[in-house]
């Protein structure tokens, strides 16, 4: 990476089960194919990238090459806190002893927003290192993501001077930086679409973070033109399945139209594909990532 270049920090959130992690993995593969050095950051005790890439070593707090030109790390609260303390005391073993004291550990984990602040601090230091670009952050479920993204408002005016003020300013400014972009992933169905619209409205009214594209995953295939009434008597089960598929498609189209009418930002609708969502086909993930990149970041 050339000195002075700005590293793009892309955040992804959405309800559980919408295929967010697979979208992140496909974009990472596309970035690697484009000659970049992408880093995927998973928050919490998850191992989705391990299941998708099957690296030789488990993914942990240290960024490592997981294959296909993609790097990944897993950031859990204890490691993030220990890493921050180590930047202050300069001795990793001492930081580990400090953080793992029973009373202090309980206090750190119970205190509001400690995990979010040290996570942002680590992301800021990763970006400043210039080793990776883009950095793709697979956020936790939407409720936790909202707290994470609301930190600039929570801490505004809390500390005016000193180390705490510097830490809060550095970490919250990361979210306000134009190179930090939040993308939403959802499903083209009535309830998930409504939940996505509510999340978008809350983000637009609250946290000061640049909002990016919408990805609607798993669009059902169009239903074939069939005269179900003529077949109902002889093939009742098949007709029921066909009608259900047709209803899913109709509801999905209505959900897409609803989101398009309410959100004026780029939107990508991905067709339903079992191989893509199983994560078994890297060629398909790579092709999907290239499509996503072209349509999500066209104006970047």
Image (cartoon, helix red, strand yellow):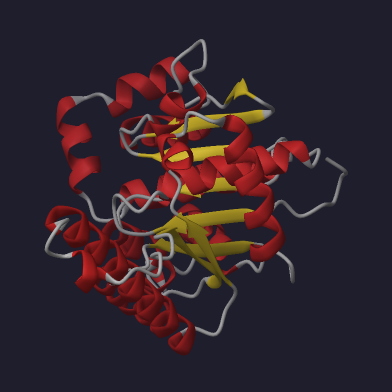
x 36%, y 21%: residue: 96
| Quadrant assignment for the N terminus | top right
x 20%, y 73%: residue: 229
Q: How many marks?
A: 0
* Residue 5 or residue 26, whichever sits in front: 26
Furthest residue toward right:
2
**Quarter occupied by residue 125:** top right
* Residue 132 or residue 156, whichever sits in front: 132
**Quarter occupied by residue 14:** bottom left
| Quadrant assignment for the C terminus | bottom right
* Residue 218 or residue 34, whichever sits in front: 218
6 versus 130 height, above or below:
below
115 versus 234 height, above or below:
above
Q: Residue 243 placed where, x, y %? A: 23, 66
Q: Residue 254 placed where, x, y %? A: 36, 80
x 87%, y 45%: residue: 3
Q: Is residue 290 visible?
A: yes
x 17%, y 56%: residue: 235
Furthest residue toward top:
56
Q: Is residue 206 visible?
A: no
19 versus 198 height, above or below:
above
Furthest residue toward bottom:
261
195 versus 127 height, above or below:
below
* Residue 37 or residue 172, whichever sits in front: 37
Q: Residue 241 placed where, x, y %? A: 21, 57
Query: 270 left or right of 4?
Result: left
């Amino acid at each position: 990476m050339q000195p002075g270049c700005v590293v793009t920090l892309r955040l992804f959130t959405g309800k559980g089960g919408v295929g967010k992690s697979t979208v992140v993995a496909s974009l990472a593969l596309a970035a690697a194919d484009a000659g970049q050095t992408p880093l995927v950051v998973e928050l919490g005790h998850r191992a989705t990238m391990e299941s998708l890439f099957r690296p030789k070593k488990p993914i942990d707090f240290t960024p490592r090459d997981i294959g296909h030109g993609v790097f990944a790390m897993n950031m859990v609260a204890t490691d993030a806190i220990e890493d921050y303390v180590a930047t202050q005391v300069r001795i990793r073993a001492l930081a580990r002893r400090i953080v793992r004291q029973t009373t202090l550990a309980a206090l750190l984990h119970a205190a509001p927003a400690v995990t979010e602040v040290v996570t942002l601090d680590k992301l800021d230091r990763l970006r400043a290192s210039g080793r990776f670009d883009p950095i793709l952050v697979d956020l936790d479920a939407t409720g936790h993501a909202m707290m994470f993204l609301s930190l600039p408002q929570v801490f505004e005016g809390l500390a005016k001077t000193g180390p705490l003020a510097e830490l809060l300013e550095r970490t919250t400014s990361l979210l306000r930086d134009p190179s930090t972009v939040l993308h939403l992933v959802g499903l083209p169905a009535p309830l998930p679409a409504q939940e996505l619209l509510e999340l978008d409205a809350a983000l637009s009214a609250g946290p000061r973070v640049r909002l990016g594209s919408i990805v609607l995953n798993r669009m059902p295939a169009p239903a074939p033109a069939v005269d179900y009434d003529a077949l109902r008597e002889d093939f009742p089960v098949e007709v029921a399945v066909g009608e259900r598929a047709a209803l899913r498609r109709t509801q999905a189209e209505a959900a897409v139209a609803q989101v398009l009418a309410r959100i004026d930002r780029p939107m990508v609708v991905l067709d339903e594909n079992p191989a893509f969502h199983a994560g078994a086909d890297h060629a398909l993930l790579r092709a999907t990532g290239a499509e996503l990149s072209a349509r999500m970041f066209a104006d970047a």
